[in-house]
Amino acid sequence: MRVAVLGASRNTGKAFVEQAIEKNLQITILARSPDKLPFAEEQLSKIRVIKGDALIKEDVAKTIEGADIVLCSLGAKIEGLSISGDIGIEETGVKNLIETIKEANAVTAPRLIMVSSTGVNGNYDVPYVCRPFYSLLLTKPHQYKQVAENAIKNSGLPYTLVRPALLTNGKLTKTYRADFGVCGYTVSRNDVAHFILEQCVLANKFINASPSIAY
């Protein structure tokens, strides 16, 4: 199986790549600075790296060519009460993905899997105590994720929108809960990557669905 990954240099995208190569999946990633990728030499030997930018449509086209699944793990960097990095990159990145896939006009279009967030489509999957924090800090980033989600849903392409709770750098536990409407406080990036790999990719579940994931 061939999987293309946008946003593989850190966080959930990085965790997914590390786990996926252990399953012998064919992985292609898009990276602005291939020489700065946080992977060991042995891992890099199992990854096809395209130098480029998710904001450039031609680079996206090179990356997803021939892919069965495309994972979009783009987004701003959130640490504590600060937001930095490419705020809104998921909106443009997803737009480029959809346009590129449709222009390729393949017999079978790849499935799009996007790492989104709980609280993007309402507060039903956000604990009451967390809702003020979401409103204070995450309103703007979530607006971009909502636009990207809507674009994917309306594209006519097969998709999965994965909505994790507040992300941590914790270990892989495999003890998370994942389904529509799951409500919880946190989940590690390693566990989100595991869910995407094992349930969405390998088991081919949650097609055209929007599962939330939390402990």
Image (spheres, helix red, strand yellow):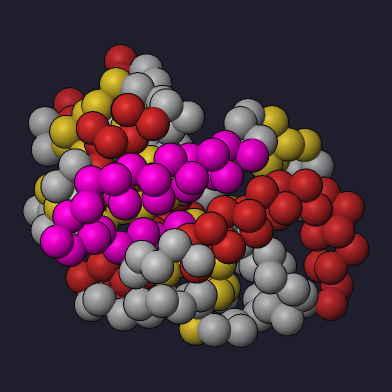
How far across and down, in percent of the image, does residue 187 sit?
Answer: 56, 65
Compared with 21, 116 (above or below) is below
The foreground one among 204 and 132 is 204
Q: In this view, does 161 lie to the left or right of 98?
A: right
Q: In this view, does 87 lie to the left or right of 70?
A: right
- Residue 141 makes an appearance in the image: yes
Q: Does the magenta portion include 102?
A: yes
How far across and down, in percent of the image, does residue 8 sit?
Answer: 37, 39
- Residue 13 makes an appearance in the image: no
Quadrant in the picture for residue 47: top left
Quadrant in the picture for residue 171: bottom left
The magenta region covers 88-114
Quadrant in the picture for residue 166: bottom right
How far across and down, in percent of the image, does residue 138 sit?
Answer: 77, 52
Looking at the rendering, in which quadrant would you find the N terminus?
bottom left
Q: In this view, does 87 lie to the left or right of 59?
A: right
Q: Does the magenta portion include 183?
A: no
The foreground one among 110 and 18 is 110
Compared with 77, 199 (above or below) is below
Compared with 48, 95 (above or below) is below
Residue at figure coordinates x 48%, y 45% from the top left: 95
Residue at figure coordinates x 33%, y 35% from the top left: 60
Residue at figure coordinates x 43%, y 40% from the top left: 96
How far across and down, in percent of the image, does residue 205 sit?
Answer: 31, 80
Compared with 112, 127 (above or below) is below
Looking at the rendering, in which quadrant would you find the C terminus?
bottom right
Residue at figure coordinates x 57%, y 45% from the top left: 91
